[in-house]
Image (spheres, rainbow, N blue to C red):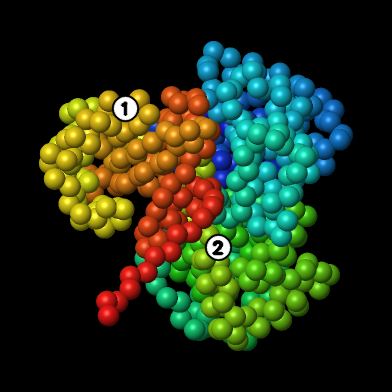
Amino acid sequence: MNIVLRVDAGQRMGTGHFMRCLTLADTLAQRGARCVFLCRQLPSHLALLLERHGHGLRSLPSRASDTPDTELAHAAWLGTTQVTDAADSLEALQGQEWDWLIVDHYALDRHWEKCLRQAARRILVIDDLADRQHECDLLLDQNLYHDMQSRYDGKVPQTCQLLLGPRFALLRDEFSRLRATLPQRSEDVKRVLVFFGGVDEHNFTGLALSALSGMARSNLEVDVVLGALHPQRPAIEAVCQRQGYRCHVQTTRMAELMANADLAIGAGGTATWERCSLGLPTLALSTADNQIRQLADAASRGLVYTLLVDKDLQADLALHLEALLQNPALRTLISNQGMAAVDGLGVQRLAARMGCTGIDMRAAQPRDSDALYRWRNHPSIRAVSRNTEEIGWEDHCRWFSSVLADPRRKLLIGEQGGEPAGVVRFDLEEDGLAEVSIYLVPDAALRCRGSDLLQSAEDWVALHCADVRRLHAQVKGSNKRSNGLFMAAGYDIDNTRFSKKLHEL
């Protein structure tokens, strides 16, 4: 799978868009995709970062003399017109067939995307403003809004699939890994993390440090994270040295620092969901207009503690910071709410929705009979099957032969790294309906995600069975994992079957 990502980074754009695209590209590459970034005037340190991660880069020429479009709020961020950028992009992408074009840029809309249709089979847009129309097949908005289900009404094609909310937050793998071993935080705040993004143009970091240093709490350990391009970097480094704070510049240990902290002071944006995934209670400030509503809606769900940026921000910070330090119950509530909303697996969900699962599906062959017999009779599979009895060999052989001979039954084996990972069966019915059954191979050498297996199977049946338009599944009520799998994959519950065993008189 060949994938191109159109994203920029710099003084105006910051690095947030670039870093979340890098996170996505890393995951896609792990699943066998080839990723190339398409950027205009990418800073050299980010170009080196792409090289270290093994991704390609195609640079667009500088167009400093062009007048940007005026109809979009962030048009000036493009550095040229959409027409010119589209022409430059098409020229840069020649000589290659692209399966996906990923667009993460506030200055591009449906006009640019329509032009690029000729270069890519499908288009994914990453957005969080909902302030312009798009021409795309898939749209991701990882933020939480009260009206997130309706924000893109009339702004995307009817066939566009929407992935909304922090379940799809693009977080690096280390966040989910650290989450699994996260120790319980103490009731006392011992360590505070300060981070306001890679650029922090208005130096919120300096205000936060002034508020902290003015508090009568000498026992607090403070970690301060700066981007390499922070405009007040020397002054902040001097404050940290004077106060005994630890200063980290362009660190790769962000997840570790969040996991070790008891409280954070920081900005909105992607960092909000990073902190939530690790249960780090945060006093969050809006450092850009698009963060105001994001943080307000997140705070109303108990995911962060926020306050409006006002003239006397330093005094407000000190006041609210003291309130959080003295309220362990509130910090625990924020921590629990955040972890419940963000599990850190959003990037894997998105990769699967793009059809990049790392799993190859194939039709079952006669040679698979012995393995299917062992897997189906494994105690873990029988326990969640409608028929929990052990299947006899002769019964299995009759069933297996009939399935292979029936054109209305599709028995598939999912393989990961050349090894069997799961089994999926589709029983085709009338009126474009098919029933799906699924299980993971017990004790597989490589354990895959059930959602990846299901997505791969759905892609297979969509490609090979054009008459199938709707899928359904029957799952035992006690099988919470499978119920959760189908719910997360977008299946609707259309009926519920209850049963009860009566005691004999």
The residue at the point 45 percent across, 59 percent down is: 497
Tell me if residue 452 comes above or below residue 383 in the rendering: above
Is residue 255 rendered to the left or right of residue 148?
A: left
Label 1, residues with CA under 10 Å away: few <14, some 14-19, many ≥20: few
Residue 114 position in % (x across, y down) = 71, 24
Residue 471 position in % (x across, y down) = 48, 40
> In this orientation, does residue 307 appear?
yes
Is residue 247 rendered to the left or right of residue 210?
A: left
* Viewer-side residue, 501 vs 60: 501
- Closer to the chain start, of discs 1 and 2, is 2
Label 2, residues with CA under 10 Å away: few <14, some 14-19, many ≥20: some
The residue at the point 44 percent across, 34 percent down is: 429
Identify the image quadrant of the C terminus. Answer: bottom left
Looking at this rendering, what residue extends furthest in the top direction?
A: 95
Tell me the SS state at disc 2.
Answer: helix
* Viewer-side residue, 186 vs 202: 186
Q: Residue type at mark 1?
A: Asp
Tell me the SS state at disc 1.
Answer: loop
Tell me if residue 140 comes above or below residue 385 in the rendering: above
Is residue 349 rendered to the left or right of residue 405?
A: right
The residue at the point 53 percent across, 18 percent down is: 97
Q: Residue 406 bears which disc, if any?
A: 1
Q: Residue type at mark 2?
A: Ala
Q: Residue 193 bears which disc, if any?
A: none
Is residue 150 rendered to the left or right of residue 254?
A: right
- Would you name the residue on which mark 2 appears? 341
Residue 347 position in % (x across, y down) = 50, 46
Looking at this rendering, what residue extends furthest in the left direction?
A: 393
Residue 247 position in % (x across, y down) = 54, 63
Q: Quadrant of residue 11?
A: top right
